Amino acid sequence: MRRYGNGGRRMGRDHHSGNFGGRWTQPIRERKPLYRARDGVFLGVCKGLARHFDLPVGLLRAIVVLLFFVTGIWPVGLLYLIAAMLMRMEPVVPFGNADEREFYDSYSSSRANALQRMKRTFESLDRRLRRIEDVVTSRDFEWERRMRG
C-alpha cells in the first residue's frame, strides 16, 4: 500500500535533513501536483489536497466536515463541488518522465491540442517509416546486400 505524507511521523524534526518543519520548507517544484484522487471517498478532493500539501487525510476531512456544518451547508458544499470540477483527475498510471507528465497535463486541459500533438507525432513517424521503406525496397539496397553477404 502506498503511503502519503511523512510516513506516519508527527510534525517536528525532519529526520532526513535534521530541520524542523521539513514539509513546509520543501521547494514547490518537489511537491506532488494537485490532482483529485481516484480512490477518494467523495470525488477525491480532500485526498488530493492532502497528498499535494502532505497533510493527513483524516485531519483535512475532519476540518472540511466541521466547516461544512459550522458555516452552513451551502458555502463549503459549493466550494467543494467547484474544487471537484476544477481539479484534474489523478492519472491512472504513474508518470515515467517529464514528457509523460506534460502530455497528461496538456490532454487534461485541452483535448483538441493533445490530439493535434498526437497527429503531428504520428505524421512524423509515418514520414520516417516511408523513408525507411523507400531505402529498403530500392534496387540499390538489394544489390548492396548481395555484395556484402
Image (tube, rainbow, N blue to C red):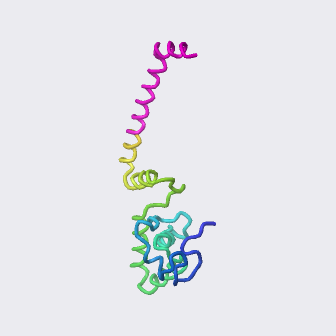
Check the image and name the residue furthest to the right. 1
109 up-or-down from 79: above or below: above
**Residue positioned 47% across, 81% down in the render:** 21
Is most of the magenta stretch helix, strand or loop? helix
**Residue in the foreground of this view, choosing between 62 and 31:** 31
Name which quarter of the figure residue 76 lies in: bottom left
- Where 103 sits versus 49, above or below? above
Number of callouts: 0
Closest to the observer, 128 or 42: 128
Vertical relation: 111 (above or below) 28: above
Q: Quadrant of residue 29?
A: bottom left
Residue at 47% across, 76% down: 23
Residue 64 in the image, given as x and y percentages of width and height: 47, 80
Q: Is residue 3 left or right of residue 118?
A: right
In the rendered structure, does residue 140 fall within the stretch colored magenta?
yes
Give 26 or 56, whichever is nearer the viewer. Answer: 26
Residue at position x 41%, y 53% in the image: 102
Which quadrant is the C terminus positioned in? Answer: top right
Magenta-tinted stretch:
120-149
Residue, x 56% and y 83% (percent of image)? 10
Inspect the magenta stretch and tell me whether residue 62 lies in it.
Answer: no
Residue 38: percent from left, percent from top: 53, 63
Q: Quadrant of residue 115?
A: top left
Q: Position of residue 117 (x, y in %)?
A: 38, 43
Check the picture and name the quadrant holding the N terminus.
Answer: bottom right
Identify the residue at the far bottom of this view.
Answer: 70
